[in-house]
Amino acid sequence: MLTLESLKLDMGKVKEIISGFIRGMVAGSRAEGIVLGISGGVDSAVLTKLCVDALGSERVFGLILPDTRVTPEEDIKDAIDLAESLKIKYWRRDIDDIIDSYERSEFYVHDHKLALGNLRARVRMSLLYYVANSRNLLVAGSGDRSEILIGYFTKYGDGGADLLPIGDLYKTQVRWMAEWLGLPERIARKPSSPRLWEGQMAEKELGIPYERIDLILHGLFDLRIDIDSLREEFGSDVDRVMEMHSRSAHKRTMPPIARVRI
Ligand SMILES: Nc1ncnc2c1ncn2[C@@H]1O[C@H](COP(=O)(O)OP(=O)(O)OC[C@H]2O[C@@H]([n+]3cccc(C(=O)O)c3)[C@H](O)[C@@H]2O)[C@@H](O)[C@H]1O
Ligand SMILES: Nc1ncnc2c1ncn2[C@@H]1O[C@H](COP(=O)(O)OP(=O)(O)OP(=O)(O)O)[C@@H](O)[C@H]1O
Ligand SMILES: [Mg+2]
C-alpha cells in the first residue's frame, strides 16, 4: 500500500539543493536577483523564503498583484506580512484596472470564467517580466511537481517563468517544507486555490484531494508501478490523473515547430 510516508524527504538536504540551484541560476545568467509573485498561498510563500535564504533579502523582489474582486483580503494581508517579515522589497499593484481595460475590447467574451481567470494569471506574468527586464532579475515560478504533472497552471501565465525551484516537490511536500521552514501555520495549512475566480478552490476543481493525487503521481512517475495495481488501490482516480497528465503535455514543452528542412 502506498502511504504518505513514502513522500517523506530530508528537508535539510532538499533546501541545500534548491538554494544551490537558485544561486547557480542567478550567477549563471548574470542577474542581480529574483522577482516573484506573492499570493498569500503556500507555494509562493515557500518559494519566497527559499529565495531569501539562498540569496539574501536584498536580492529578492516581490510583487503582490491582487484583483480585489476575487482575491480575498486575508490573502493580501498574508502576502504583505510575509514580505515584511522576510524584509524584502515588494510592490502591491492591484490589477483590476488592467483587467477592466481588456474587457473593453471588441473580442471580449463576457462571462467566460476560465478565459478571464487565465488572463489574470497572464497579466501577473507580464508584470513580473516587466520588473525582471527593467532590473536585470530572473522570474521565479512557484509551480510544484503536482501542478506541473497534471497541467494545473495557466500556460504562459503562472507557468511563464525562468526557473522553477520547487518544481520537483509534490504539493504535499511543499506543505511539509512550509512547516519545516517555520512559515506561519495559516499559510502552511491554507487550502490551495489559484483565486482566478471567486470561490475557486483547487481540490474542488480537480475533484481529488492533493494527497491522493500525489500518491498516484508518485506511483506512476517515481515508482513506475503498473497501472492495474494502482487502480486496485485508487480506482478510477488513476485514470483521471493520467488523463490530466496526457491532456496537458503541450504545456510542458516548447511549441511544436513545423520543420521545413528535411
Ligand atoms: N494539444 C494542444 N497543443 C498545443 N496547445 C494547446 C493544446 N491544447 C490546448 N492548447 C492551448 O492551451 C490553452 C489551454 O491552456 P491554458 O490557457 O493554460 O488553460 P486551461 O488549461 O484550460 O486552464 C488552466 C487551468 O489551470 C488552473 N490554474 C491556473 C493558474 C494557477 C493555478 C494554480 O494552481 O494556482 C491553476 C486553472 O484553474 C485551470 O483549471 C488553449 O487555449 C490552447 O491555446
Ligand atoms: N495575487 C497574487 N499576487 C501575486 N502573485 C500571485 C497572485 N496570485 C497568484 N500569484 C502567482 O501565481 C502563482 C500560482 O498560484 P498558486 O495558487 O498555484 O500558488 P500559491 O497561491 O502560492 O499556492 P497554492 O497553490 O497552494 O494556492 C503564485 O505562487 C504566485 O507566484
Ligand atoms: Mg494560490
Image: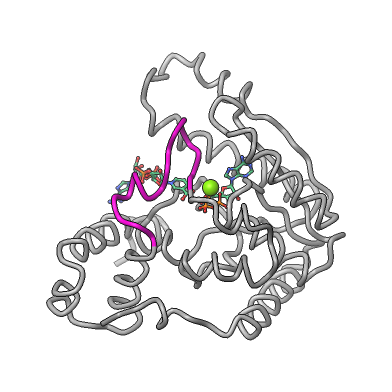
Q: How is the image coloured?
A: one colour
45 left or right, relative to 112: right
Q: Where's residue 245, x and y in %? A: 29, 61
Q: Quadrant of the C terminus?
A: bottom left
Q: Nearer the viewer, residue 248 or 13?
A: 13
Q: How many marks?
A: 0
Give the image quarter of residue 218: bottom left
Q: Where's residue 229, x and y in %? A: 15, 80
Magenta span covers which residues?
Answer: 193-210
In the image, what residue occupies the spot 29% across and 70% down? 216
Up-down relation of residue 123 to residue 151 (above or below): above
Up-down relation of residue 113 to residue 26 (above or below): above
In the image, what residue occupies the spot 61% across and 24% down? 96
Give the image quarter of residue 59: bottom right
Q: Nearer the viewer, residue 113 or 28?
A: 113
Give the image quarter of residue 136: bottom right
In the image, what residue occupies the spot 60% across and 64% down? 163
